[in-house]
Amino acid sequence: MRMNYHVLTLFPEMIRQGLNTSIIGRAIAKGILSLEAVNIRDYAFNKHQKVDDYPYGGGAGMVMQAEPVYQAYKAVCDQTGKCPRVIYLTPQGRVFDQELARELAKEEELIFLCGHYEGIDERVLEEIVTDQVSIGDYVLTGGELPSMVMIDAISRMVPGVLSNQESGETESFSENLLEYPQYSRPEEWHGCKVPSVLLSGHHKNVDQWRREQSILRTAKHRPDLLKKAELTEKERRWLRE
Ligand code: 6GU
């Protein structure tokens, strides 16, 4: 089943250029994903193609008007014959994580609504938005980069997007542990040697070392994740030592 993304934006080129390379570009070329960037400006209802206006009540900046956003949304619904979930990218939303990526990867159509300026008229948000999502606690100039971040994370959970070789990674974060360190040739670089266990050929020892490294890294950099991670009682004791 193909995943069809529709991104409503004032900067469609940003979306097309940002997602046409690497793994996502390859999946689009293979037909596992489709990506449509809808220019909200094409649905402006005045001859100057203006899509923003001053905020009622005053204040700085401009507000994106309801009608062009609504018409762009309606065009996607008419074209697909469905009314897909609409994800509005906003710092006010629920913070995006791997669990939400996994959930959204099960949909067949997704609409992303990218705001700009001081935001979008609340009335159209109330009428069409099903999910408000933020990608973290910092402020960006628009929803385009967050929508691309979400599309990347969701797509790698869609069956067929990653090759067999790549798909070992689909489970990594579900364990709530950070990745172990990786090394490649040469054996010594700038006086630093590759950990000897990785050269030993003992697969069981390699696996155990990697597991320990993952746990240590998580404890050091993301102790919050460790609470959710599934560690054995033995591993928890070892970590306390
Ligand atoms: Cl979704 N939008 C904007 N403008 N800034 C953000 C964000 C979204 N998530 C984090 N910062």
Image (tube, rainbow, N blue to C red):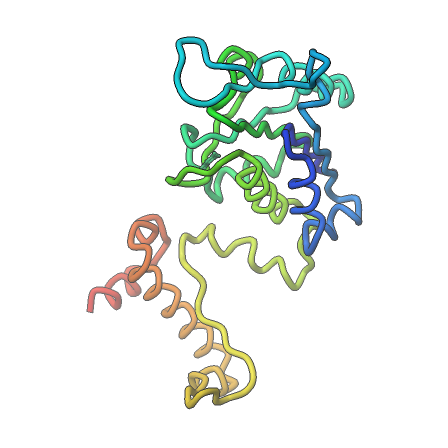
In the figure, is residue 189 to the left or right of 59?
right
Q: Position of residue 110 (x, y in %)?
A: 64, 30
In the figure, is residue 100 to the left or right of 82?
left
Residue 83 or residue 39, whichever sits in front: 39
Seen as rendered, the residue at the extreme left is 241
Q: Residue at x 29, y 54 (%)?
A: 223
Instruction: State which quadrant residue 216 falls in.
Output: bottom left
Residue 157 or residue 7, whichever sits in front: 7
Quarter of the picture containing the C terminus is bottom left
Q: Residue at x 51, y 31 (%)?
A: 89
- Tell me if residue 49 comes above or below residue 10 in the rendering: above
In the figure, is residue 206 to the left or right of 128?
left
Q: Position of residue 226 (x, y in %)?
A: 32, 54
Seen as rendered, the residue at the extreme front is 48
Q: Residue at x 71, y 18 (%)?
A: 43
- Tell me if residue 204 comes above or below residue 239 in the rendering: below
- Tell me if residue 50 comes above or below residue 189 in the rendering: above
Residue 46 or residue 24, whichever sits in front: 46
Q: What number of labels is visible?
A: 0
Q: Position of residue 16 (x, y in %)?
A: 70, 42
Q: Position of residue 229 (x, y in %)?
A: 36, 52
Q: Residue at x 40, y 74 (%)?
A: 209
Quarter of the picture containing the N terminus is top right
Instruction: State which quadrant residue 7 falls in.
Output: top right
